[in-house]
Amino acid sequence: MNYWDQYLLPNSIDEALGMLHEGKGSAKVIAGGTDLLLDILQSRHPAVDALIDITRIPEMQVVERAYDRIYVGGGTTHNDIVANPLLQQNAHCLVEASSLIGGNQVRNVATIGGNVAHALPAGDGSIALLALDAEAEIASRTSRRWIALEDLFLGPRKPAFEPSKEILVRFRFPVLKAGESTMFQRVMRPQGVAIAILNMATWTRKSVEGIIEDIRIAIGPAGPKPLRARKTEQSLRGKAVNEGTLSEAVEALLEETRLRTSPHRATRAYRKHLLSVLLGRQFGNIGPQRGR
């Protein structure tokens, strides 16, 4: 059987959107294809009339700074993210997350846009971008709009845009300033290329005295969507990092996460234990390391 009838190579966003429109719901955007092609070949996704390869669109490959923001094209591969000096300086959590996705061959072709658009609760790129307070630009035939990354997910594999009519073009987030830092941590099965058992990314701004002036924490899988742990953030703001404040933060984290047992990855109890471990690692292994 034919898994697709046409393989199209547009040179612009408008051209790609026109091809999507002509496909009338049976055309799919593809970049690395590390998820979509496997789904089609393994019968988890029906055959399509056309695959629209966006890797020749220059706009989707650009990583640049404009004023106080960093822009990352949705077609940027994970290995390109890892090697980019601008991202190494301003988005260490994204660089670290991209370095852990799949094997080296996968990272050579898999893209950050595909990782996010797949809308998995533990997508490494999604978790890192969420901690960076990123926004995503969505293009349709009539307009473009920016949407907060936190609002981009409706549920597992359900992005808040129409893949049959719209394209995720790029991301943007603030440049890193003095006193700010980011970090990404991941626990995975020994083979190292599967979806994370649990991952966590943080963005933190500290005063010269070591007080947490502001913080963003993202976790997955901790519910049906990538989670921004706002209650936990609030419990840490305005405080110095010590065993007591981290113990309070772990309690808040346990309250706002929705962990579950996965027959292929980990039990709920083990994931609860990992919450305190990962939060402690974000601050140099200070605080409780025993789960509840």
Image: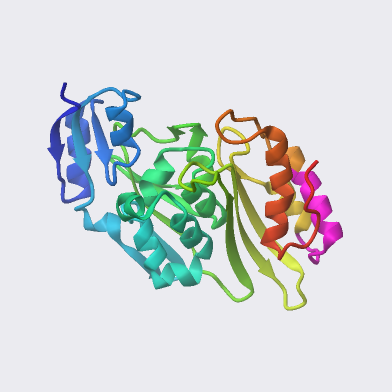
Position of the C terminus, as image quadrant, is top right
Q: Quadrant of residue 282?
A: bottom right
Kindly report the secondary structure that dominates the magenta region of the rendered protein: helix
Left or right of 7 in this view: 144: right
Stretch in magenta:
237-253
Q: Is residue 253 above or below residue 59?
A: above
- Please state which of residues 273 and 46 is positioned toward the viewer in this rendering: 273
Left or right of 269 in this view: 140: left
Q: Is residue 43 above or below residue 257?
A: above
Residue at image position (60%, 68%) is 181
Q: Quadrant of residue 165?
A: top left
Q: Is residue 174 above or below residue 270?
A: below
Residue 147 appears at what percent x and percent y? 46, 46
Residue 196 appears at what percent x and percent y? 54, 44
Residue at image position (31%, 27%) is 42
Residue at image position (46%, 62%) is 95
Position of the N terminus, as image quadrant, is top left
Q: Quadrant of residue 287?
A: bottom right
Residue 158 appears at what percent x and percent y? 45, 31
Residue at image position (18%, 32%) is 50
